[in-house]
Amino acid sequence: MIAILYWAAFIAAIALLIGAIFLARALVAMSKTMDAVTKTMGTLDTQVTGITTETQLILNKTNTLVEDVNGKVARLDPIFDAMGDIGVSVQDLNTSIRNMSSTVSNSVKMTEEKVSNTVSYSNAFMVVRDILKKRKANKEVK
């Protein structure tokens, strides 16, 4: 029976040794993985720092560009104001021309009436003159 205990202890020791070997291999693999993660994190930190620097430069250039565009737009505002004033002036001119045209049209109508009346009076005068001439001619004949 003691031999069985020795054999059992021997088998348990071998099992413990095999377990320790597998555990050691797993720990070595985990150590290599952790080293790779550490290297990756170091590279990632360097790349993020580079990206951050480039992003800051781009933002500074963008801010400068926006300020430049705002300045140029501010210089264009008076031009657009002047164009609006020109539009108002043209509209006023059109209104004045319409009023003048209406006035001229009314004057022409009044003049037409006067000319028509004058022609009518002239015709009447000529008829009266012809009648007077005929009477005069008739008196001389008698």
Image: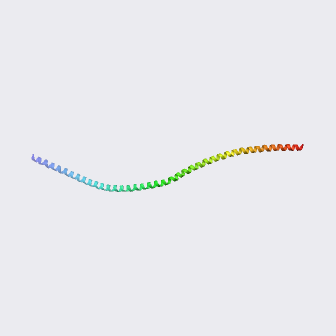
Q: Residue furthest left?
A: 2
Task: Find residue 94 and report its horizontal and vertical position in percent.
Answer: 60, 48
The quadrant of the picture occupied by the C terminus is top right
Task: Find residue 11 and report its horizontal and vertical position in percent.
Answer: 15, 49
* 68 and 26: which is toward the camera: 68
The quadrant of the picture occupied by the N terminus is top left
Task: Find residue 35 and report its horizontal and vertical position in percent.
Answer: 26, 55
* 38 and 84: which is toward the camera: 84
Which residue is rendered at x = 13% and y = 48% of the image?
Answer: 9
Quadrant assignment, res 123: top right
* 113 and 62: which is toward the camera: 113
Which residue is rendered at x = 64% and y = 47% of the image?
Answer: 101
Quadrant assignment, res 48: bottom left
Which residue is rendered at x = 65% and y = 46% of the image?
Answer: 103
Query: In the picture provided, is 113 more to the left or to the right than 27?
Result: right
- Above or below for 132 versus 33: above
Query: In the picture provided, is 49 more to the left or to the right than 96?
Result: left
Query: In the picture provided, is 17 more to the left or to the right than 73?
Result: left
Indicate the colouring scheme.
rainbow
Query: In the picture provided, is 81 more to the left or to the right than 61?
Result: right
Task: Find residue 10 and report its horizontal and vertical position in percent.
Answer: 14, 49
Quadrant assignment, res 61: bottom left
* 139 and 43: which is toward the camera: 139
Which residue is rendered at x = 32% and y = 55% of the image?
Answer: 45
